[in-house]
Image (tube, rainbow, N blue to C red):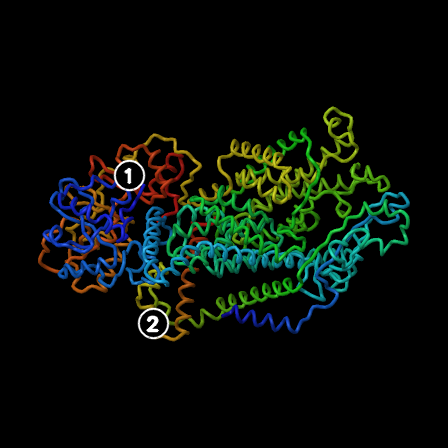
Amino acid sequence: MSIKLLILACTILLSFNSVSGSYDDKRCKCVCPRPAAVLNNTISSDRTLYIGNVPPNKCNCDGIILPKVGELIKGREQEFCPRCECIYENRNTTIIQVVVIIVVWVIMLLVAYMGFLICLDPLINKRAKASYQEHTNEDDESTLGGPSQQMGARGNVLNRVTHQQDKWKRQVREQRRNIYDRHTMLN
Amino acid sequence: MERFPLKAHIPKMATTYQSVYKKGSNTGNGHGGPSGDDDMVNIKTGPQRAADTPTTPTSHGTFQLYEHGTRYSDASATCCDLCPKMMEESNEAGETVPLVGDDVGDAVMFSGLPGEADDIPGIGQYEDFHTIDWQRDIARDRMRHRYIVKKRQDSIWDLIKGAHDAWSGWVCVLLVGVCTGVVAGVIDIGASWMTDLKFGICPQAFWFNREQCCWSNDEITFDRENCSEWLTWPQVFGESRDSTGAYIISYLFYIAWALTFAALSASLVRMFAPYACGSGIPEIKTILSGFIIRGYLGKWTLIIKSVGLILSVSSGLSLGKEGPMVHIASCLGNILSYLFPKYGRNEAKKREILSAAAAAGVSVAFGAPIGGVLFSLEEVSYYFPLKTLWRSFFCALIAAFILRSINPFGNEHLVLFYVEYNKPWKFFELIPFVGLGIIGGCIATIFIKANIYWCRYRKYSKLGQYPVMEVLVVTLVTAIIAYPNPYTRMNTSQLIYLLFNQCGISNTDPICDYQRNYTDLNTIEKAVAGDKVYNAMWLLTLALVLKLVMTVFTFGIKVPCGLFIPSLALGAIPGRIVGIGVEQLANKYPKSWLFSGECSSGDDCITPGLYAMVGAAAVLGGVTRMTVSLVVIMFELTGGVRYIVPLMAAAMASKWVGDALGKQGIYDAHIALNGYPFLDSKDEFQHTSLAADVMQPKRNETLSVITQDSMTVDDVETLLKETEHNGYPVVVSKESQYLVGFVLRRDLNLAIANARRTLEGITGQSVVIFAGPTQPLPPGPPPLMLTRILDLAPITVTDQTPMETVVDMFRKLGLRQTLVTHNGRLLGVITKKDVLRHIKQMDNEDPNSVLFN
């Protein structure tokens, strides 16, 4: 259920938040030495960057660099162009946006739930903790139809959720005991 | 070796052979033991009265099987009939006999049939920290399969069900592949965004990392790699970019974010899913070898491991996401297998899906689908039939395809550090490559020894009581030391990419600061290293030491952490250094005999990036002791098969050095440290002990056995209470100790509880009947028939069998226990635990460290 909620929240967030136009999904990125370094024979490690939005087959010196610096290196293209490296890249901004927002949401939800379990839950759940017997085996429990199932049958959804939560908490407690206290696993 | 005589329970089969066998059963010769599948037929439930069998013409033909020597010379069928239809008929035939669970429609042991849920619940499953019985589970699946094949002719619906059953394995791995690809994409994007969050933010669109933020900005000045859209934290607070104050603010923000991420990761793991910590590969290996760790592959582990992995990778700790990715994929495999009862309810079959999932995990982690399949085969899987190979192949393919369509790094590849080389390597370079292999083996051994020492210390000392604090301290120290050095400050994947890369024009890092002359095209690549390169070498050496030390302390802290990436970095750094050294040598002495033959053409003939890759492969190979899969993964990273020989040479050299210096790879060492019951099929058992030395009970103890037809329910329950064995041999009588079969404690418990609940008249005084000659029913409460939970064909060995053979049987057949006989009488039991403890004892280790219930 929380996942549905999450998706809903994300779609709302997305609809409010349109990506600004400057972020294209593809680019052709060319790196060259400074024209001066080539033409004037100086040794320099400076580079220049040329970025343009062209089809992949145009992602080369002719398509990107010459339109920009054609004047400067007129006549010496044959010397300049081989020193440049062009790569075509694409991305999907929507996927990035959705994924990052989902990740942030999930982390926030988990932190909130953790805060709830640490702070409020002990207060609420002080009562009737001993009413559950210690079951170590989830499948026995779910299928044997002991007290738990009867309860599930007559109880409402909330009861069942609470029961599931308790079962889960018991499992986590067991895991914690194995790892943090007894150090029998995952050392 | 056929474990179960229940193979041929198809009524069709039974009717086919009916006439033949009927005669046989009347003569009472028996059939000299099962010699083929078809001999083993039709085991009948419940004792029919002795007189009935030969005379009563039953429609399905009950006949004799398993003639137990002279004991049953006049007895008739003693077995149970597992076919539901026949069961009803035999009910009608012998109405006086209350059968166990009349409501049960089908064989209990072979439950798992869809739609026939009213078995004794829970049978066929295992308890936490138990090993599975491969033979039994596979036989169960075969039974289920036969049942479906048989039913297929009945109706269209059954035909569809049969078809669904046939393709469910493929559908399951398809789903696993899709989900793995998606989750890997989420982790990649999330981690790259969060890593850059340590340095700054993109105010216009906060979800972009620096690269994405400066996507179409061509004003990036290369010395700072910064653009106007991306704001570093000092800039956010109005500082200028290059002041001392800005450096301090960046430093503090770096540390603060690192601590926040690490603290979040550690506390989420502690709060929700402690099993999500660590790399997971040793545990996956153990699980795939047939061990049950409940919750290890569950929903919460999946969620927390994914989220915690993003957080811990971004915190700048010296760890990677590749190992946990295998765990995440296996979680997905486990969860999705529950959609298909064929796999979800059969632990042995489930492991086929898990093997495929592990392949998909590596496939997305390294962008190496074939490497993933081989990794699954070489490193993690225990039982790997060809069918699983194809499924793994498909699963890895789908996962890689999905991740490729998500395109998390914007480079059309699945990993950040994908590089392409185009230069051939020279023959003499094999010498430095093998040298790198030796260096790699040494680094790997140092790492393994130190890490195991530290983990052992953590396990037995007070340090282990402060898991979250430990994470915070390690993060703090890492962040403080790492920030000043640019090579440790950057993400380890980026560092690896930088080291693997060739010094093209677009690479402006100091390690590519060659004195290039741009005017002469022919010599553009042949260049003398500048001062900055030597400076960078020192920084890289420091980075190597730091990474080595920090990784030793990091691997094993209680956050999701893998060690592929750190070990790749540990190898890539010395590799690059050696590469630059060789390159400069060739540059300086182009006329020397070594280089003159092959480097004379004037261009740069050495690729330092290739050395980095070979070094990385060497360390990774030394750490994990992988060979084939490692080489394939590495060459899938480079996109060329040309470098297989260098990689093979380095991997082999590193494995030899590693094996010479220390016995185990890191995963095996961690398995041994934790005492997981992993029976390594790589080791050989070299001692000369006999089965009699290992078996339980030892001298002066008695073996707990159950007799086939003379113990009451109370007796059995007392036995269950007083002993803690996981299974009991069933014998003819305590005096004779002739073996009848084997019954599991869990099944016994469930069956008795079920019988008490569902059957009337079962009291403590009821006699429990497992097998035996039919006899007139004794007066008193009705007997409890437990024929169906009895394994009539337990694997036995004699007491003089050498342990070599026994260990081999355990490994190859995946046994859980074997019974030891002497002169045909039961003498004792050897369980997997006994075998593991015996091996430990023989190797002078503490036998009590085996984690086992």
Which residue is nearer to you in this view: B767 or B479?
B767
Q: Is residue B341 left or right of residue B764?
A: right
Residue drawn at x 72%, y 61% as measured from the top left: B213
x and y percent of residue B40 in the render? 25, 46
x and y percent of residue B828 in the render? 25, 40
Which residue is nearer to you in this view: B264 or B641?
B641
Q: Are marks 1 and 2 in contact (CB under 8 Å)?
A: no
For disc 1, the chain is B
Quick one: SS at disc 2? helix
Label 2 CA crowd tier, 10 Å (few <14, some 14–19, many 20+): some
Can residue B242 be spotted in the picture?
no
Q: Which mark is residue A50?
A: none
Q: Is residue B548 left or right of residue A144?
A: right
- Give the residue at mark 1: B695
- Give the residue at mark 2: A151
Which residue is nearer to you in this view: B257 or B507?
B507
Q: CA distance from mark 1 to mark 2?
A: 46 Å
Label 1 CA crowd tier, 10 Å (few <14, some 14–19, many 20+): many
Which residue is nearer to you in this view: B139 or B672?
B139
- Amino acid on which the number 2 mark rests in the picture: Met
Can residue B131 be spotted in the picture?
yes
Q: Are marks 1 and 2 on the same chain?
A: no
Residue drawn at x 74%, y 53% as measured from the top left: A57
Quick one: SS at disc 1? loop
The quadrant of the picture occupied by the N terminus of chain B is top left
x and y percent of residue B330 in the render? 48, 53
- Amino acid on which the number 1 mark rests in the picture: Met
Residue drawn at x 8%, y 58% as measured from the top left: B779
In the image, is residue B363 above or below residue B756?
above
Q: Is residue A87 left or right of residue B68?
A: right
